[in-house]
């Protein structure tokens, strides 16, 4: 692993007083940051709006620099044990006939060392690893925030002051809106919905993809999962209420009902699933990640969109760098250092998200057909490896586009 070792002055004056940190959001970035901050001697509180840790979500990749981070956290073996172990992806037509089967690693551009796990499993591991040392408060949120004094008001708990406040509260971050920047969300013109559904096609580590212009349905089941996950991705710019699941289901129905294949059955199953997820495909692009005592990490700061396949890796790497910089100095120095290290890496991965989305959804029947044909003939082409490398190289390059500093741990 390439380490860029900077001289360290040991436990910083800022850290020595066991400074208090409030993290908003307990998904991936929040618990990962809590893990590192506790290790550096900070007192960490995490407030999460949901009443308990949220289950669900799609399979997520851990690649490149993020692999080094989970290795340093001692989590690599456990995550490997929870790997999805996907074998094949098949494109199906409206009657369910498999048009082409592609090896999963070829399709996803997965390198040998890369990990793929379920988002809910990763979140649970990070929570389990930190819950004994971190004060988790579920079912509450931040209503006001003074970035200069660090005073925070909550929906339920009494107001309190913290030395540092970090927003790890995702794409629609409240901390970002309250303290750092107005918005910074760039809508990529698509909506995505994900739900756990019965595995009625008895898929075994196999993913099926059904694509018609402007709309794609994916269905898969991973290792050890008795259920399946369905993903609906579609071009749309209509507004919707984030808390209104009924409305979101209506949008899905209007868009997908009668689209062919198993779509109608999957719509019904998604409607009764208990982890229904619905969101815009968006990126976050900010002029700055921090102000005074407040900073952002993960999707709240630099969501690359699910199409990049890199949101989780960015969150893990961001947590490592932000905590490491805070272990060395005050926010006034640590926050700009964190931002400077992250910027080029973030830019590469945001570009990847925009480029990938174009490939995930076809604009015309001809484009769908050509995509399927390309994948069908690919394994037989003499220059197969060169062609695959051309598609997968940008993913590997983006995942490694940061040199992780080596930070000293408080003993
Ligand atoms: C239930 C769920 C399912 C997901 N499924 C997928 C998926 O299938 N594919 C994919 O690519 N990405 C998915 N994501 C997003 C993915 O987790 C992130 O892209 C990535 O892992 C970075 O994580 P994050 O911790 O920065 O943000 P997120 O995972 O979005 O987590 C943000 C957390 O903050 C909490 N929160 C939000 N606002 C507040 C507030 N005001 N106060 C307190 N807490 C708040 C949220 O409840 C959530 O727990 C999902 C996220 C969630 C929460």
Image (cartoon, rainbow, N blue to C red):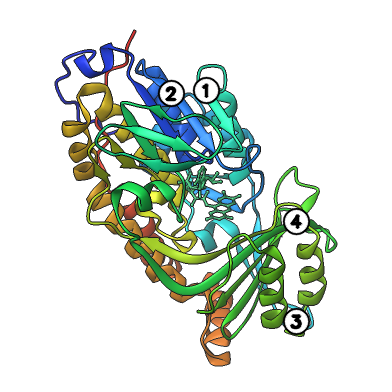
Q: Which numbered disc, 4 or 3, marks the residue closer to the eye?
A: 3
* Disc 1 secondary structure class: strand
Do residues under tags 4 and 1 come within 8 Å of each other at their CB atoms? no
Return the residue at label 4: 228
Instruction: Return the residue found at the far top.
Output: 411
Q: Residue 243, located in which quarter of the rendered image?
A: bottom right
Tell me if 225 is positioned left or right of 248 in this view: right
Q: How many marks?
A: 4
> In this rendering, is residue 209 above or below 409?
below
Say which element carries label 2: strand
Q: CA distance from mark 4 to mark 2?
A: 36 Å
Q: CA distance from mark 4 to mark 3?
A: 20 Å
Q: Which residue is mark 3?
A: 257
- From the image, tell me which residue sits under label 2: 44
| Upstream in sequence: badge 1 or badge 3 | 1
Distance of label 1 from label 2 (alpha carbons): 6 Å
Cα distance in 3D space between marks 3 and 2: 47 Å
Q: Nearer the viewer, residue 237 or 242?
A: 242
Task: From the image, tell me which residue sits under label 1.
Answer: 135
Determine the image quadrant of residue 273.
bottom right
Position of residue 403 measured from the top left corner of the image (x, y, whole percent) = 24, 39
**Residue at image location 51% in from the left, 67% down from the top:** 280
> Horizontally, is 411 left or right of 311 in the view?
left
């Amino acid at each position: 692993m390439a380490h860029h070792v900077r001289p360290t002055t040991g436990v910083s004056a800022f850290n020595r007083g066991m400074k208090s940190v409030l993290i908003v959001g307990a998904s991936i970035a929040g618990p990962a940051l809590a893990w590192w901050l506790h290790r550096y001697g900070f007192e960490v509180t995490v407030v999460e709006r949901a009443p308990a840790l949220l289950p669900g979500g799609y399979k997520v990749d851990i690649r490149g620099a993020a692999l080094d981070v989970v290795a340093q956290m001692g989590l690599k073996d456990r995550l490997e044990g929870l790997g999805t172990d996907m074998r094949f992806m098949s494109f199906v037509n409206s009657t369910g006939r498999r048009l082409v089967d592609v090896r999963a690693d070829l399709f996803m551009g997965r390198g040998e060392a890369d990990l793929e796990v379920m988002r809910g499993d990763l979140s649970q591991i990070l929570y389990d690893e930190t819950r004994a040392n971190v004060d988790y408060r579920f079912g509450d949120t931040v209503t006001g925030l003074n970035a200069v004094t660090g005073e925070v008001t909550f929906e339920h708990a009494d107001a309190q002051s913290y030395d540092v406040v970090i927003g790890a509260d995702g794409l629609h971050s409240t901390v970002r809106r309250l303290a750092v920047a107005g918005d910074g969300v760039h809508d990529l013109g698509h909506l995505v919905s994900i739900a756990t559904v019965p595995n009625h096609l008895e898929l075994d580590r196999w993913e099926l993809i059904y694509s018609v212009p402007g709309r794609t349905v994916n269905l898969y089941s991973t290792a050890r999962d008795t259920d399946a996950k369905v993903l609906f991705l579609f071009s749309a710019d209509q507004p919707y209420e984030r808390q209104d699941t009924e409305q979101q289901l209506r949008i899905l129905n209007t868009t997908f009902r009668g689209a062919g294949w198993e779509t109608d059955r999957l719509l019904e199953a998604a409607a009764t699933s208990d982890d229904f997820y619905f969101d815009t495909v968006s990126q976050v692009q900010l002029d700055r990640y921090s102000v005074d005592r407040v900073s952002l990490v993960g999707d709240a700061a630099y969501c690359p969109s699910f199409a990049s396949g890199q949101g989780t890796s960015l969150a893990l790497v961001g947590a490592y760098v932000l905590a490491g910089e805070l272990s060395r100095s005050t926010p006034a120095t640590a926050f700009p250092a964190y931002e400077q290290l992250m910027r080029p890496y973030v830019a590469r991965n945001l570009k990847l998200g925009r480029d990938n989305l174009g490939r995930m959804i076809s604009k015309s029947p001809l484009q769908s057909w050509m995509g399927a044909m390309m994948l069908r003939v690919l394994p037989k082409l003499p220059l197969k490896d060169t062609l695959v490398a051309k598609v997968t190289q940008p993913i590997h390059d983006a995942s490694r586009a940061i040199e992780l500093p080596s930070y000293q741990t408080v003993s």
